[in-house]
Amino acid sequence: MRPATASELDVLEAATDQVIAACDGNTRAAVRALIVAKGLLEAELAEANAATSKGYARGRLKKSEQS
């Protein structure tokens, strides 16, 4: 994995500030919100994977990614 560039770090800092601001400065609430969002995204990804044809995905996934 390559190190992040200064520009990427600036974007990450801005996103971090936005999440904390959206939670009225409460960092614990910000972490909780991110954990919930991650769970929702994982569920959405699982649904998309389940709906994807095995024939369409053939050859596009590594052996460890196939289930």
Image (cartoon, rainbow, N blue to C red):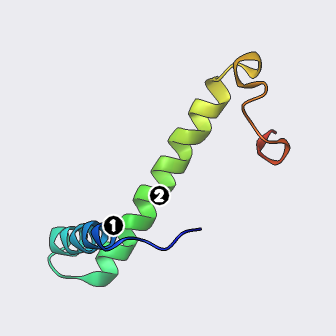
State the image coordinates of residue 22 (x, y, percent, origin top left).
Answer: 17, 67
Image height of 3 relative to 40, above or below: below
In the depicted structure, whether residue 23 falls above or below residue 64:
below
Residue 64 in the image: state x and y as whole percent.
82, 48
Q: Which mark is residue 59?
A: none
User: Residue at coordinates 20% horizontally, 74% vertically from top-left?
Assistant: 17
Q: Residue at x 14, y 76 (%)?
A: 24
Tell me whether circle 1 and circle 2 mark residues in contact (CB < 8 Å). no
Residue at position x 51%, y 40% in the image = 44
Neighbour class for label 1 at 10 Å: few (<14), some, many (≥20)?
A: few
Which amino acid is tagged 2?
Lys
- In the image, 15 versus 45, the foreground residue is 15
Kind of residue indicated by mark 1: Glu
Tell which tag, 1 or 2, sits nearer the viewer.
1
Count residues near mark 2 (Cα–Cα under 10 Å), then give few for <14, some for 14-19, many for 20+. Answer: few
* Numbered tag placed on residue 38 in the rendering: 2
